Every structure is written in C-alpha cells, then in structure tokens.
Image: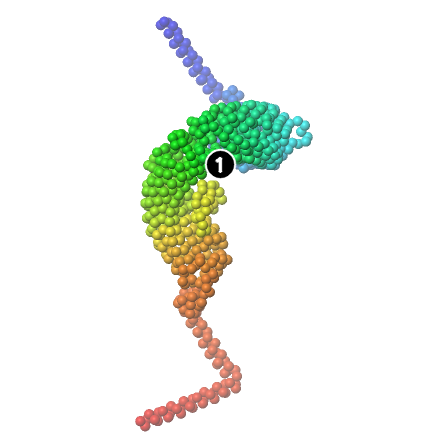
Amino acid sequence: MTILTSQMSLLLLLLLSLTTFHKIMSSNEHRLVQCNEKDQEALLIFKKGINDSIGQLSTWLTEKDCCAWEGVHCDNITGRVTELHISQLQGEMNLSILELEFLTYLDLSENEFDVISFTTIQHNITHASNLFYLDLSSTDLQMDNLDWLSPLSSLKYLYLSGIDLHKVTNWLQAVNTLPSLLELQLSECNLNNFTINPSIEYLNLSSLLTLDLSENKFTSQLPNWFFNLTKDLTELMLQENNIHGEIPSSLLNLQNLRYLDLSFNKLQGSLPDGISQLPNIQHLDLNSNMLSGSNIPSTLGNLSYLNYLSIGRNNFSGEISENTFSKLSNLDYLELTSSNFVFQFDLDWVPPFQLSYLFLSNTNQGPNFPSWIYTQKSLQYLDLSSSGISLVDKNKFSSLIERISDYLDLSNNSLTGDISNLTLKGELILYLYRNNFTGGLPNISPNVGDVDFSYNSFSGSIPHSWKNSKYLGSINLWNNKLSGEVLEHVSDWTQLWFLNLGENEFSGTIPIKMSQLFLNLHVLILRANQFEGPIPTQLFNQSYLFHLDLAHNKLSGSMPECIYNLTAMVIFNGEGSIYGSIELFTKGQQYHIKLSKIRKTIDLSANNLSGKVPLELFQLVQLQTLNLSHNNFIGTIPKTIGGMKHVESLDLSNNKLSGEIPQSMALLTFLEVFNLSCNNFHGKIPIGTQLQSFNASSYIGNPDLCGAPLNNCTPKEENPKTATTYPENEDDDSIRESLYLGMGVGFAAGFWGICGSLFLIRKWRHACFRFVDGVGDKLYVTLMVKLNSFRRN
C-alpha cells in the first residue's frame, strides 16, 4: 500500500510538472509571436479618424505589440488579428478595418460614429471572407449603400441596428449575397420598403434563423413572398412599423417559428385560421393593432408551447373561458389589455399554468375579483387597473398582493377596506390610486421605487416602515385624509424626484435638510395642507425643480433673498418626458394633466408670506405659471418681468404691492390669465396688446390705477402731486431746470420782440416816445402837487 501511494504521488508530481512546463512554453510562444505588420498598419489607419476622448485606444502605440492593444485579439501561433472589440468611440469609422484578412469577429457597437469611410475597401476586401460576426450597431450614422457586404460570404451574424439606411433601396438584394447568414438585425434603420429589384431572379435567405426589422418605417402590406425567403426562421421581429393589411397566410409556412412580434402596427382582419399549425411558437405578440374577430379561443388554445401571449389593444371580441387556456400549460406572460372579451371563468377553475406577468387593465372583470388569479403563486407583475372590480375575498386578496414582487397596479377600481396591516413588496411600482381604501397606509418594503395611493380615504400618519425605503423615487398621496408631520421622514428619501402630498392634513414645517438632500427633486407639491413656518432658502437651489406648488398652507415670513439656482426654470429644455399625472392649477382653473418638464410652475398663493418679492423670482424666464396671490407681499414689480416671455398665467392679486405697472409688461405676449387686482398700484396701465385685452376685474381694487380697460386718466389721476403734466420719468431737478430755461427764453423773446419793432418802425418809435414823454409829464405834475401839499401840512 505504501509503495502504491508513493508511485501515485510521483505520478501526480510528474503531471503537475508537465502542466507547468506546458504553460511556460505556451507563454513563451505567445511572447515570441509578434503582431503582423500589415495588420498593425490597418489598425493605425482605422485609428486616424477616431476621436478617443476617454482613452480607449491609449494602448494603440507603434512601440507596443498590436496584439497587446486594447480590444485586439490575435492568434497565438500566427500573430494575425482575429478579433476586435471596441466601444465608446466617436468620429470616423473607417471600414478599411475589414481588410484584416484573418479577422473573424468585429464588434464596433455602442459607439457614436458620425462619419463612415470606405477608402480602398471596395477593391481589397476579398481577404475578409473569414469574417463571421459583424456588429456595427450605432446611432447618428448614415450609409448610402450596402454593396460592401457582398464579399463577406462567411458572414453569419450581422448587426446594423440604429444606422440610418433610408437611402438604401436594395437592402434585400444586399442581404441576399450572404449565403451563410443566420442572424440579421436591422432595427431602427429607417427602412421603408420591401422592394425587390426586377433583375433579381431568385431571392433566397434559406440559412436565416433570426430577422429583426422592428422600429422602421415600412408603410406597405406584408408581401406573401416575404415568408417564403426562408423555411427555417425561428425569430421574426416586425414590431413598431406602419405595416397594414391582413396577416398573409404564407406566415404559416414558418413551421419552425418560435418568436413572432407584429405589435404596434396597423394590421387588420382576423388571425389566420391555421395559426395553431405553428406547433413550436413560444412567443406571440400582436398587441396594438386593428385585428378583429371572435375566433381567438379556438385559434390559440392548441399552442401548447406558448409561454408569452400578448393580443391586447385590438378589436377582438367573443368569449374567453377556461377552455381557451386548457392546453397552455407553459404560459408565463398574458396580456389582454383594453380588449372587449367577455370573460367566463368558473369560480373553481385552477389554470394549468403559473403566470409571472398578468396584464388585464381596461377589461371588464368586475365586480368580483377574478378568483382564478388567487391561484397564481409566482406573479411578479399584476395590472388590473380600470377593470370594474369592487369585491374581493379579503384573506385571499391580502395574501395575493403581498406576494407581488415587482409591479402592482390596481388603480381606477372601487376597492375598499383597511390594508394597513399589509406589507407591499413591489420593487418597481405600487399603484392603488382612485379606489376607496380606508384606514392607515400599508407598509412598504425597503426596495419600493414608485408609490401612488392618491384619491383614496387613507388616514393617519405615514408608517415608520416608509422611512427605510431608501429607493423611493416618486410618492403621490394627493387627496387623502392623512395627517402628522410627514416630512420628518425625508432625510432618508435621497432618491426622491417626485413628491405630491397635496390635499391632506399634514402639518409642521418644511425642514431645511429636505431641500439639502433632494438633489434630484423635479416636482414638489404640498398644496392644501397645514404646513407653517418659512420657506427654506435651500429649496430655491434645486437645479432640477420645475414644478413647485406650496399654495393654501400657513407658510409665513419673507421669500428667501439669495441667488436662485432653479436652472430648470431658466434654461429651455425641449424634452417632453412624462412625470406622472397631477392636478395643475393654472389660468384660473384646475386641470388633470400628464406633467412634463416643458411646463414650469411656481404657486405660493394663499399663505401668509410677506416682505418684498425677490428680484430673482422674476428672472426665471421659462416660467409659464406664477401665482403669488393672497399673501402680504409689498414693494414694486421690477422692470425685469418683461423677460418672462413664456408666462401664460400671472396672478399677483390680493397683496400690498405698489408703484406703477412697468411698461415692460407689455412684452408678455403669451398671457392668458392676468390678475393684479386688490393691491396699491397707481398710474396709467401700460399700453400693449395683451394688457388691454383683459377686463377690468384684472385691475380693480387699485384706487389710483387708470387707463384702459379702467376709466380714462385725468391729469389729477395721472399725477396727483401736481396739475402740470410732465414726462413720468423726469425728477424734480430736471423739471425746475426746464421751467427756468423756459422763463429765460420767453423773457428774451418778448424783450427783443418789442425793442426790435421800435427800432425798425419809425412811426411806432415816435409814438412810443410821445407816449413815454406824456407819461413822464403826468408823473412829474402829480409828484410836484403831492410834494407841495406835503410841505403846506
């Protein structure tokens, strides 16, 4: 036994030695093999047009072996470049890289090339016949032709998604030159036709297994011959085009098809009767078309391998019962959204499948919650919104919604009851809005992202468990009966970008740390609560904030005087991303809208705010709604308000503002609602197309204000300090200077007018002298008489 053990130990040691020697030899061989000089030259030509801002090609140096360059792989024996993987580049893509004659794998996806260069490729690409994988998927790149593909006879995988090919009319013929092609990805390429050049006698893609033509601009019908190109196709993606007409019966020729997506087109008619003859189909998506008919149950019920079925948003009708799904034991995803089916399921039916995804929104399920859904133990996504449900089995319902792991949407029903003892686990979405839930809010797991419990009758305070939900991005509790100092939780909600607590009974102050931590805050709505105290200065340093509604609270103090960093309200952003639905109070009305970043709003109305309105507030030039009404603001409106040229609703009424209305307000040409009533404005209303278009109610309550649409101004009304009318911008010194100058000029004109006439006209001169002599004599006689009388007395 000892001898045997020793022999085995020696054998093991020998094997280890041989393995180590082999590794060393292999390593030495690799170090001895140098990159081919011709290959290195081709790589350097490719590098010349590249804008490598992040240093992806920093290792591409002539003094370094090109086989050690980033993204370059060489054959260990020959040293020839066989693979190239590079991403995050910009600039010019030079397809001379295809001249690498031993290149088999080229991945240039996830780059941002804006120019493509072919150089000598048309003549020297004959050596690239070894290439079997080519990925140029990109954006903002345009190609005029695909003729360069023809020499790539060994190509099996071709990915050109995202490249603009709208000028390429012969894409089918170009692809036809690739006899070995297994997978073709041409999504988002702006392709617009299925045209075949008449000179092409035979079009054959018999080797093709996967074809992706999604998100293009096809506007025609699907030609029958299209499904005869290949018999072995397993995956076909044609979604998000404008394809119309009926689904050709030749589709049934694809007996190996496992994945079919025709969603978001304009297909009409009914499903082909023989669709059940596709025995291997696993994924079928016909969602969002114009398909009709009532043959769905008999047509789809036999597809036993089906695990994904999406046929919602069509015009299908008819009855769906347990017979429809009796053979679909592999079904994992079911979507029947916005359909007109009549659901007839037995109350005791237990489906043969366990779904992970179920979408039945906008279907007629109620009033009872569908009992078969209670049997689904693996649900991750459940959408039963707007389905007319009002009655549930309390225990089964509670157990079900606590199991949902990712997405729960039961909104727009009539569900009732107290769910405060439940813990909801949806990591992405929890939507229970527009129901009749009462009692306290349910607990939520720490990983919840979006919560919308608006339009219910929840009461009490926010549960302590919410404090631990550090991934909360959106909270909507609008229109409930909630109370307490909710904002004590906010220090842990650092990911929050949407917070709507409006129409409740929350109290307390707005904590400073809230505005310091919410660096991504886009929307803040605290309207119609009992919040008090000042508005934190830090709230006006939220660079992403574009919707601020603090109206109808008990906020007090003056507005922060600081440098406002509300960048989103100053810089135009044309992106119209949707940020959920809100109640928008603007233009004197309430609207339920889909909120987007395009609309900028500040509403601080109906509080106890005082002091001057900061000049910075009138420099938010992208604002469309500004409401400061029903406060105690003082001071004047600055002339800079004329720069707010996008404002559509401006309400400064019921304050203590004074001074004249700036002439610059005439520049606000988009105003639809305008109210300056009940202040202390005086002077004349500036003349402008907009300001005179509003009726007198926009200006009443300002006793010293005049001009259209109010009464015409009198001199006293125009300036009550003096009856003399002077330009409104002149001060007292300039007025006095003008008066003295006018008196001097008048005196000089009068003096020289009289003296000049006497000097030039003799008759006038003599008459004047006689008059003066006569007056002098009379004065002399009168004086002497008075003097003699004085002496006698």
Expressed as whole percent of the image width and height from the top left, the position of residue 77 reads: 51, 20
Relative to 97, is 434 above or below? below
Expressed as whole percent of the image width and height from the top left, the position of residue 658 reads: 39, 59
Residue furthest bottom as drawn: 792
- Asked which colour scheme the image uses, the reply is rainbow
Q: Nearer the viewer, residue 350 or 223?
A: 350
Q: Nearer the viewer, residue 418 or 657?
A: 418
Report the label total. 1
Relative to 412, is 561 above or below? below
Q: Label 1, secondary structure: give it.
A: loop
Q: Quadrant of residue 381?
A: top left
Q: Amino acid at mark 1?
A: Asn
Question: Is there any visible trace of residue 107 in the rendered image?
Answer: no
x 57%, y 25%: residue: 276
Residue for badge 1: 362
The reply, left or right, for residue 682 in relation to residue 507 is right
Q: Nearer the viewer, residue 530 or 351?
A: 351
Expressed as whole percent of the image width and height from the top left, the position of residue 375 reads: 43, 27
At label 1, counting other C-alpha atoms closer than 10 Å, the crowd grade (few under 14, some 14-19, many 20 or more) is many
Question: Is there any visible trace of residue 194 in the rendered image?
Answer: yes
x 43%, y 55%: residue: 675
Expressed as whole percent of the image width and height from the top left, the position of residue 537 reads: 35, 47
x 45%, y 90%: residue: 774
Relative to 655, is 160 above or below? above
Q: Quadrant of the N terminus?
A: top left
Q: Quadrant of residue 204?
A: top right
Q: Quadrant of the C terminus?
A: bottom left
x 36%, y 55%: residue: 632
